[in-house]
Amino acid sequence: MTPTQTVTTVTLPPEQLLGLIREAALAALAEHEQHKALAETLLTTSQALDFLRVSKVTLHGWRMSGKVPYRRIGRRVFYVKSELLAALESGRRGRERRTAEAGKKVSML
């Protein structure tokens, strides 16, 4: 300890000390669970290819065109599984809408 630092002591009743420790432990556990949940849903490029059943070229094209969201951690690319599912669903709805519109145009001829 340097000469300019001071130490302050506080006297707490045991119940209050236990409450503070419990709050800190619960906060740390909640943060750990959030990180754990995110880590479980992150997919590497290889895992994303298997999950989507597409080629590396297709996935790269989707990523570059903004159709598929991704994360960079350092130089590595990761995908969030729920975001991939949402992107697929969004693309499916758009394709269904275009198909329905094309059917209407054909039936008018």
Image (tube, grey):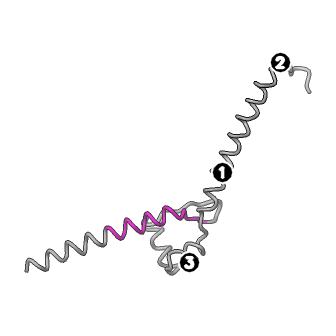
In the rendering, which numbered label is found on residue 90?
none
Task: Say if the magenta span includes residue 17.
Answer: no
Residue at (83, 18) in percent of width and height: 11
CB within 8 Å, label 1 to label 3: no
| Residue 15 x %, y % | 77, 25
- The front one of 87 and 36 is 36
As helix, strand or loop, the secondary structure at mark 3 comes to: helix
What quarter of the picture does the C terminus occupy? bottom left
Magenta residues?
A: 77-93
Binning the other alpha carbons within 10 Å of mark 2 as few (below 14), some (14 to 19) or many (20 upward) gives: few
Residue 33's tag is 1
The image shows residue 92 at horizontal and vertical percentages of 35, 71
User: Relative to the observer, which residue lies in front, 99 or 58?
Assistant: 99
Number of the front mark, 1 or 3: 1
Q: Which mark is residue 11?
A: 2
**Vertically, is 75 above or below 51?**
above
Q: Amino acid at mark 1?
A: Glu
**What is the distance, in whole Å, between disc 1 and disc 2 at their CAs?**
32 Å
Structural distance between the alpha carbons of marks 1 and 3: 26 Å
Within-10-Å neighbours for mark 1: few <14, some 14–19, many 20+: few
Q: Is residue 22 left or right of residue 71?
A: right
Q: Magenta region's main secondary structure?
A: helix
Which numbered disc, 3 or 2, marks the residue that appears first in the sequence?
2
Q: Quadrant of residue 21?
A: top right
How far across and down, in percent of the image, does residue 106 sit? 13, 80
Label 3, on which residue?
50
* SS category of the residue bearing label 2: loop
Q: Residue at x 86, y 21 (%)?
A: 7
The earlier-in-sequence mark between 1 and 2 is 2
On screen, residue 57 versus residue 28, left or right, reads: left
